């Protein structure tokens, strides 16, 4: 009888030891998984955040001179924000604003240095990117109030960040924004760390009072980038 009890005890002890070993092995794996999650949410290295617009080219025009489909080519134009010289053949990411389209990357073809619009203004780089080839951008309808030639704006991120996506206005809450930024002045909020929170915020506001640009004569703007738990203003635009 005692021998049977000893056998049962030994069996139980071996089972407990095996369970302990399994827990010890799993702990490093769980820690590794948590580390990978933190790494995936690390802010990528971003040198430039700008704004531009999609432009579609055609040989057809209406009576007022506006271009009409079918479109011959599509490109991103009127890009502002490059205050450093970008490297030719490197890629930038373009995040469509207000429209149901994923981000896309384009390679830089040319960068030309230009003087600012006033003596006190900084120099900036005019950029030319490869044409857009995605057929969806040839067919998609323009946003309300936009011409079909210039259907929507894009946020430009350089170098490319494949995870970048627009956060819809309906998902933005005031506490997500930099201090003193009013929700109604937000032109774009972009997540680049895949956590559903804004990492880039671009604003447009009336220069006179900081309110919305509706009925405003002069429009100003600012661009913010998240830095750890705080925000940093990385660009500001004012009329010349």
Image: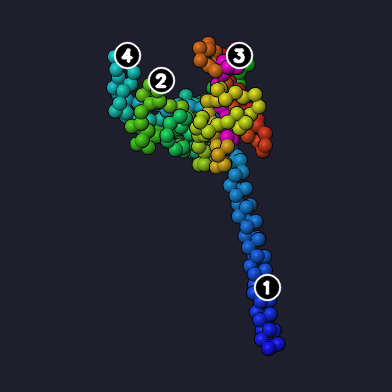
> Which residue is denoted by mark 2 in the rendering?
145
Compare marks 3 and 4 and give the one earlier in the sequence: 4
Between the C-alphas of marks 1 and 4, the distance is: 84 Å
As drawn, the label of residue 17 is 1
As drawn, the label of residue 28 is none
Image location (x, y in percent) of residue 44: 59, 41
| Residue 88 in view, yes or no | no
Compare marks 1 and 4 and give the one earlier in the sequence: 1
Query: Mark 2 and mark 4 in contact (Cβ < 8 Å)?
Result: no
Image vertical order of residue 34 relative to residue 219, above or below = below
Image location (x, y in percent) of residue 163: 52, 42
- For mark 2, give the secondary structure: loop
As drawn, the label of residue 209 is 3
Image location (x, y in percent) of residue 45: 60, 39
In which quadrant will I find the C terminus? top right
The residue mark sitting in front, 2 or 1, is 1
- Residue at (58, 17) in percent of width and height: 211
Between the C-alphas of marks 3 and 2, the distance is: 25 Å
Between the C-alphas of marks 3 and 4, the distance is: 35 Å
Residue furthest to the front in view is 1
Is residue 132 found left or right of 19 in the rendered image? left
Q: How many numbered discs?
A: 4
The residue mark sitting in front, 1 or 4, is 1
Disc 1 crowd, CA 10 A, few/some/many (<14, 14-19, 20+): few
Instruction: Tell me if residue 164 is in the magenta stretch.
Output: no
> Which residue is denoted by mark 4 in the rendering?
64
Instruction: Tell me if residue 205 is in the magenta stretch.
Output: yes
Compare marks 3 and 2 and give the one earlier in the sequence: 2
- Residue at (65, 32) in percent of width and height: 231
């Amino acid at each position: 009888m005692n021998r049977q009890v000893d056998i049962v005890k030994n069996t139980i002890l071996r089972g407990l030891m095996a369970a302990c070993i399994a827990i010890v092995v799993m702990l490093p794996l769980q820690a590794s998984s948590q580390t990978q999650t933190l790494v995936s949410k690390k802010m990528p290295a971003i040198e430039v955040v700008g704004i531009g617009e999609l432009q579609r080219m055609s040989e057809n025009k209406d009576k007022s001179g506006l271009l009409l489909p079918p479109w011959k080519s599509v490109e991103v134009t009127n890009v502002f924000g490059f205050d450093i010289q970008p490297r030719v053949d490197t890629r930038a990411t373009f995040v469509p604003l207000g429209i149901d389209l994923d981000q896309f990357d384009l390679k830089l073809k040319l960068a030309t240095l230009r003087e600012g619009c006033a003596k006190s203004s900084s120099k900036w780089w005019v950029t030319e990117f490869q044409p857009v080839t995605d057929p969806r951008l040839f067919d998609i309808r323009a946003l309300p109030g936009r011409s079909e030639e210039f259907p929507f704006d894009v946020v430009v991120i350089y170098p490319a960040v494949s995870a970048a996506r627009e956060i819809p206005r309906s998902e933005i809450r005031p506490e997500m924004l930099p201090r003193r930024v009013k929700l109604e002045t937000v032109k774009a909020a972009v997540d680049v760390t895949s956590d559903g929170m804004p990492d880039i915020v671009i604003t447009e506001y009336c220069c006179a009072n900081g309110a919305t640009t509706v009925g405003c004569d002069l429009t100003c703007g600012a661009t913010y980038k998240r830095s750890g738990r705080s925000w940093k203003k990385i660009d500001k635009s004012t009329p010349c």
